[in-house]
Image (spheres, rainbow, N blue to C red):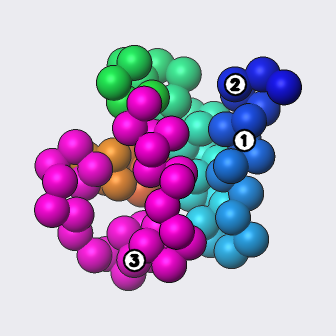
Amino acid sequence: MSEESALRWQCRRGMRELDILLERYLERKHITSSEAEKVLFRQFLNLSDPQLAAYLLRGEKSAEKATQSLVEQILGASAT
């Protein structure tokens, strides 16, 4: 399984709203991301669904600047 296929599978969370946001980011932004951002995204996908929902659907802010930046990029990828 290729890395992209594995990431696409990890983006499928079982909550349609999360699936859409994560898959759009993967399709639209991930390929042009820096290696550090790609690592951060892989780590982000390891969070629990409730934590992902808090960041992406309920607007909870992350204490970590890099994570908050990634959240904003994921949300921005869905807006375009």
Q: Residues within 10 Å of mark 3 (few under 14, many from 20)?
A: some
Q: Nearer the viewer, mark 2 or mark 3?
A: 2
Q: Indicate the quadrant containing the N terminus: top left, top right, bottom left or bottom right.
A: top right
> Magenta stretch: residue 56 in it?
yes
Q: What residue type is labelled 1?
A: Arg
**Rendering quarter of residue 8:** top right
| Residue pictured at 33% horizontal, 46% vertical | 70
Task: Identify which residue, 48 or 66, lies in the foreground.
Answer: 48
Q: Is residue 80 visible?
A: no
Q: Earlier in the sequence, mark 2 or mark 3?
A: 2
**Residue 8: mark in rendering:** 1
- Residue 62 on image: x %, y %: 22, 63
- Residue 77 on image: x %, y %: 47, 46
| Residue pictured at 37% horizontal, 69% vertical | 55
Q: Is residue 64 above or below residue 26?
A: below
Q: Which region of the structure is painted magenta?
A: 39-68
**Residue 3: mark in rendering:** 2
Q: Mark 2 near mark 3, Cβ–Cβ under 8 Å?
A: no
Q: What residue type is labelled 3?
A: Ala
Q: Mark 1 near mark 3, Cβ–Cβ under 8 Å?
A: no
